[in-house]
Image (tube, rainbow, N blue to C red):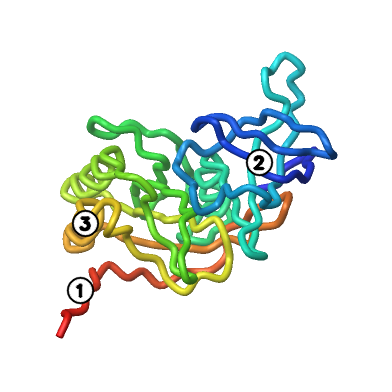
């Protein structure tokens, strides 16, 4: 996935989930943030960010914030891009060996699951989660409690019961991480649901991405660790 008409800026602050102030070429601009998550470890004053300039002259904000440089590593934080990147990646033949068709936003049960893949060999639902949270080269999800995420995992488990294949694909929007794990501290129930999902037959996958200032592409598998580390006992 490629972006067009990008510019570099310096992050200043974020008054709310939807907008930020960024200095671009010496001028302070109010920009749209394409990720409503907390992103507190990403959006720090002075960090270099990448913005895509809108071609719509009637928009209130001229720019979308899509990428941030965290200690030398580009991290894409566009929450809309993982689904598009995953669809592109699958259609290129990277997950299934045969030719498949892909339908987006497929209604199943009480949810809309991101991708529905079909061929002569399979029927599969795929839920995609973008991952921007990283600490000590370990990626984790979510960065805030997500009841919606829990619901999606439940729907995938139900899909397996009804004879579908089911996948939960974590798209890690950066390179260089060692492994993926649930964010046990923030939402332990989500981690527990992933453990249950694996036992029910849901495939849990994590892939990193090659990220540049103007592009993102799913690249390599990342080990998934669903075991919860026990705190060390004090002697």
| Tag nearer the camera, 2 or 1 | 2
C-alpha span from label 3 to label 2: 41 Å
C-alpha span from label 1 to label 3: 21 Å
C-alpha span from label 2 to label 1: 38 Å
Q: Residues within 10 Å of mark 2 (few under 14, many from 20)?
A: some
In percent of width and height, residue 153 lies at 26, 47
Q: Residue at x 63, y 47 (%)?
A: 45
| Contact flag, marks 2 and 1 (Cβ < 8 Å) | no
Direction from residue 152 to residue 24 in the image, left or right: right
Direction from residue 150 to residue 93 in the image, left or right: right
Q: Is residue 162 above or below residue 167?
A: above
Residue 197 circle label: 3
Give the structural element (helix, strand or loop) at label 1.
loop
- Res 194 → quadrant: bottom left
- Going from the N terminus, do you reach mark 3 or mark 2 first? 2
Q: Residue at x 52, y 47 (%)?
A: 82
The residue labelled by disc 2 is 12
| Contact flag, marks 3 and 2 (Cβ < 8 Å) | no
- Res 167 → quadrant: bottom left
In percent of width and height, residue 6 lies at 77, 41
Q: Residue at x 42, y 33 (%)?
A: 105
Q: Is residue 13 above or below residue 173?
A: above
- Going from the N terminus, do you reach mark 1 or mark 3 first? 3
Q: How many marks?
A: 3
| Tag nearer the camera, 3 or 2 | 2
- Going from the N terminus, do you reach mark 2 or mark 1 first? 2
Give the structural element (helix, strand or loop) at label 3.
helix
Give the structural element (helix, strand or loop) at label 2.
strand
The residue labelled by disc 1 is 230
In percent of width and height, residue 150 lies at 25, 44
């Amino acid at each position: 996935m490629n972006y067009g008409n990008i510019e570099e800026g310096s992050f200043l602050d974020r008054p709310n989930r939807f907008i930020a102030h960024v200095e671009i070429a010496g001028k302070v601009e109010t920009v749209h943030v394409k990720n409503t998550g907390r992103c507190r470890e990403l959006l720090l004053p002075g960090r270099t960010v990448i913005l895509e300039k809108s071609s719509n002259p009637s928009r209130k904000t001229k720019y979308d914030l899509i990428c941030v440089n965290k200690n030398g590593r580009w991290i894409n934080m566009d929450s809309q891009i993982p689904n598009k990147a995953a669809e592109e990646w699958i259609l290129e033949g990277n997950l299934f060996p045969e030719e498949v068709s892909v339908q987006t936003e497929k209604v199943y049960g009480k949810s809309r699951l991101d991708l529905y893949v079909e061929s002569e060999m399979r029927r599969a639902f795929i839920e995609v989660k973008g991952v921007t949270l990283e600490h000590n080269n370990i990626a984790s999800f979510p960065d805030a409690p997500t009841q919606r995420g829990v619901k999606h995992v439940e729907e995938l488990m139900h899909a397996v019961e009804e004879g579908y294949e089911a996948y939960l694909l974590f798209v890690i929007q950066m390179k260089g991480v060692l492994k993926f794990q649930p964010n046990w501290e923030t939402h332990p129930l989500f981690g527990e649901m992933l453990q249950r999902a694996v036992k029910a037959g849901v495939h849990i996958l994590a892939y990193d991405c090659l990220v540049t200032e103007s592009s993102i592409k799913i690249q390599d598998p990342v080990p998934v660790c669903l075991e919860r580390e026990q705190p060390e006992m004090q002697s």
